[in-house]
């Protein structure tokens, strides 16, 4: 598996390199309902995931499934307009393949974004949370299987997945843009079903502030291969048992879209700060 994935990554990187006229510095993963941010990029190259050899393709509504390479306020970026998820049926190695590809393309820092459910009572729909740590619940490690020695260690340290310097830049960016930014722990579940109220009560007792179906696996893969990591959550709904109404993906998309302009200001400022 390790040699096969290394070959797929090498082929994908060679394909993309041939089409790029720049080296991206910051990678961005856009979560559910947040894909319009890619329109702010002065695009150098747009590549659908389906065009990249051996690359997984996004199948979920609201995830366009393409890379946008270019510059944002002068910062060279690789923007993933949509991600692939474990619940789509992919092996975890495929789910994190885009993160590893960005590393091979020259990315040094990655900003992961998502729409999530609020567990902490302070996190109301439409608010934002800076991820300071995460829990991974019944989701296999993206590092399972043969280690990719060319990317990182067999047993990487995860005591600080989310880079302290990038966390400070996110706080600075939020203050500059007048955006209230909560901080907390994110828990990734396997999905695609929303969680039960009993599960949410358990996650809260374990220390989780928000819940979703992505991000933690990408953060672990990013740290494994030496990337600096930052993650931002748009709280799109109250988690099961907290919300008085049944959960729906339509609510997630609606709230994310409504808050997109504020989110875009925050993310744009953060990328500019990273690129200084």
Image (cartoon, rainbow, N blue to C red):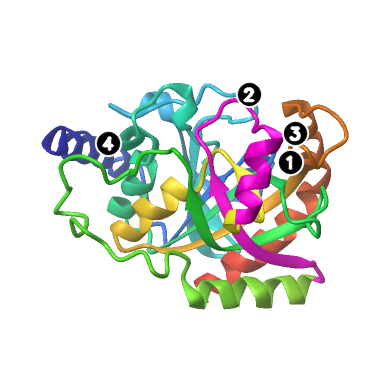
Residue bearing mark 4: 12
Residue sitting at 42 percent across and 38 percent down?
139
Instruction: Say if residue 212 shows up in the picture.
Output: yes
Label 1 crowd bin: few (<14), some (14–19), many (20+), radius 10 Å: many
Residue 37 visible in the picture: no
Q: Nearer the viewer, mark 2 or mark 1?
A: 1
Q: Nearer the viewer, mark 3 or mark 4?
A: 3
Query: Could you say whether the residue bearing mark 2 is in a helix, strand or loop?
Result: loop
Residue 50 drawn at (x, y percent): 41, 24
**Position of 62 compared to 112: left or right?**
right
Q: Are marks 3 and 4 in contact (CB under 8 Å)?
A: no
Residue 236 highlighted magenta (yes or no) = no
Magenta extent = 178-205
Name the mark nearer the viewer: 4 or 2.
2
**Viewed as shown, does residue 109 lie left or right of 59?**
left
First reached walking from the N terminus: tag 2 or tag 1: 2
169 above or below 219?
below
Q: Mark 3 or mark 4: which comes first in sequence?
A: 4
């Amino acid at each position: 598996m390790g040699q096969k994935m290394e070959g797929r990554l090498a082929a994908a990187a060679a394909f993309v390199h041939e089409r790029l006229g720049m080296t991206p510095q910051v990678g961005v993963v856009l979560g559910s309902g947040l894909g319009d941010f890619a329109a702010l990029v002065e695009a150098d190259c747009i590549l659908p995931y389906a065009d990249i050899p051996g690359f997984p393709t996004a199948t979920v509504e609201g995830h366009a499934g393409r890379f946008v390479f270019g510059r944002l306020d002068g910062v060279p970026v690789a923007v993933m307009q949509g991600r692939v998820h474990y619940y789509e049926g992919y092996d975890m190695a495929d789910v994190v393949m885009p993160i590893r590809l960005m590393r091979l393309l020259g990315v040094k820092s990655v900003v992961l974004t998502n729409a999530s459910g609020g567990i902490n009572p302070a996190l109301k729909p439409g608010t934002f949370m800076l991820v300071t740590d995460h829990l991974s619940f019944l989701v296999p490690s993206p590092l399972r299987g043969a280690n990719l020695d060319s990317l990182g260690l067999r047993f990487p340290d995860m005591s600080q997945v989310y880079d302290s310097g990038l966390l400070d830049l996110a706080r600075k960016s939020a203050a500059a843009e007048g955006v209230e930014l909560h901080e907390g722990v994110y828990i990734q579940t396997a999905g695609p079903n929303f969680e039960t109220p009993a599960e949410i009560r358990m996650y809260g007792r374990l220390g989780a502030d928000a819940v979703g179906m992505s991000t933690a696996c990408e953060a672990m893969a990013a740290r494994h291969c030496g990337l600096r990591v930052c993650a931002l959550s748009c709280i799109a709904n109250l988690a099961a048992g907290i919300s008085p109404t049944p959960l729906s993906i339509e609510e997630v998309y609606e709230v994310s879209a409504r808050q997109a302009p504020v989110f875009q200001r925050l993310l744009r400022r953060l990328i500019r700060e990273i690129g200084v």
